[in-house]
Amino acid sequence: MAYSDKVIDHYSNPRNVGTLDKSKKTVGTGLVGAPECGDVMRLQIEVDEATNTITDAKFKTFGCGSAIASSSLATEWLKGKTVDEALAIDNMEIVEELALPPVKIHCSVLAEDAIKMAISDYRVKNGLPALEMEKSHH
Amino acid sequence: MLKLPIYLDNNATTPLDPRVLDAMIPFFTEVYGNAASRNHPFGWAAEEGVDYAREQIAQLIHCDPKEIIFTSGATESDNLAIKGVFEMYSQKGNHVITATTEHKAVLDTCKHIEKLGGRVTYLPVNEQGLISLEDLEAAMTPETILVTIMYGNNETGTIQPIQEIAKIAHKHGALFMTDGTQAVGKIPVDVIADGIDLMAFTAHKMYGPKGVGALYVRRKSPRVKVTAQMDGGGHERGMRSGTLNVPGIVGFGKACELARLEMAQDAERLSKLRDHLEKELLTLEESYVNGSVERRLPHVANISFKYVEGEGLMMGVKDLAVSSGSACTSASLEPSYVLKALGLSDDLAHSSLRFGLSRFTTDEQIEYAIGHVKEAVTKLREMSPLWEMHKEGIDLSSIEWAEH
């Protein structure tokens, strides 16, 4: 399988690999996928409560190069965005940016789900209702 | 300078030994006759080349040269043996016994004869990849005409107890066939001592050319016959029609001669090199050898690295040409059925790498491979949430995963 240069770049030099303290109220965690499916993505955001802005984002991913690249790219995009802006990230933007082939679109879906789940987790921690997660397509 | 990528996929195919090529070349341009042409020297010279090769091959596996039937490769030999025995011995019975870890050339041929009214028993294997002799004994019936169990497995290198299997088959009046593709030329294979009635093998797994293989068919005690699957000029004692691939056969013969002369030293060097590779890679936590360590081909290692994903791992070891437990069935992302038959979970099967060494593999290449794999696994684990959870002592099976 031929990977795009951008996927190879993110795979070789992943941005923002790591772990945020999930016990903090300002940190939201999204864990999506399953080991037997071959992809598990954990995406975390840290939010500045005053401005509702994402100040930090970290990921860890078990998966193929495209899954690693999708989550790495997502963390890059999340930093500096407000929570509302982050919610608007669509998986197809990731597909376009990384030139993912059709068989790898699920990696971008997973990244979008992880973003939404992290935001939802942050909301719940701060007394807001959980996000309605649409059942992801497959 | 080390040339990258390094080829460590020698169970898929081996490079041609230059000495084999030298033997073949005259048979393309000078000795180009049809070995079946009896009326002129061009044909005689070609036939002489084929006869010599037949002897070289026969010497390697300790049979009579007349017992070698040339084919296009091991897949054709497997097909000819199984379908040919099924047709030839249909009066006696319709039952065939094989194992779940056989190559697709055997399994799919067995599926084929099932459609023709055959009955096939697929024996399971233990975690070492070995069949149980008790299971085999229990599966034998008066209708059993053939037991077909591979010599050495292509994915794990596990060597089956061939002599014991042959004895059980013969005790019940069945023929014993083995797919010797990975074993012949790598370890001593003696069709007499081993009690083999039919054996498929091929040139390109032992430094010979692609497109030529053989089926050993026993002529004495018992005299085995297979129904031809290709109709035509009646070549190869009527068992396989088609003009002989003379240059390929000459190369196959040379490859067998070299294997006979160099097998012992190659095996000794390669098993040491393989053991070194394996020992080093097993220093990584949560890495496991797949298949039997005691009963194994000398040049093969199959290792799973837990908590890294197979495709990501393949991408990380881009300087190596190896097979993975998920990529080897190519297009599909199905984990290897061989590793699953050993009882491996899907994720462990996916995260496996198969290393196949060759006569041409160097110490330097293996040193590089060790460092490269260690680096890739370590890097991917640092990136893996599963590894982090494992390190924190979380039982991954206790988590409710959001299936997607």
Image (spheres, rainbow, N blue to C red):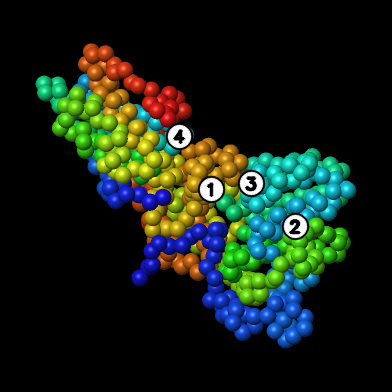
Quote the CA–CA distance across marks 2 and 3.
Answer: 25 Å
In the image, what residue occupies the spot 21% across and 33% down?
A: A78
Q: Decide: few, some or many residues near mark 3? Use Cα within 10 Å; few <14, some 14-19, many ≥20.
A: many
Secondary structure under badge 2?
loop
Q: In the orientation shown, which residue stands out farthest toward the left?
A: A50
Same chain for the residues under marks 4 and 3 in the image: no
Labels 3 and 1 touching (C-beta < 8 A):
no
Residue receiving disc 1? B329
First of labels 3, 1 by sequence position:
3
Same chain for the residues under marks 4 and 2 in the image: no
Instruction: Provide residue B156's location: percent of width, then percent of height.
Output: 57, 51
Residue receiving disc 2? B229
Q: Decide: few, some or many residues near mark 4? Use Cα within 10 Å; few <14, some 14-19, many ≥20.
A: some
Q: In the orientation shown, which residue stands out farthest toward the bottom?
A: B41
Camera-nearest label, 4 or 2: 2
Camera-nearest label, 2 or 3: 2
In the image, what residue occupies the spot 55% across and 62% down?
A: B13
The kind of residue on which mark 4 rests is Cys
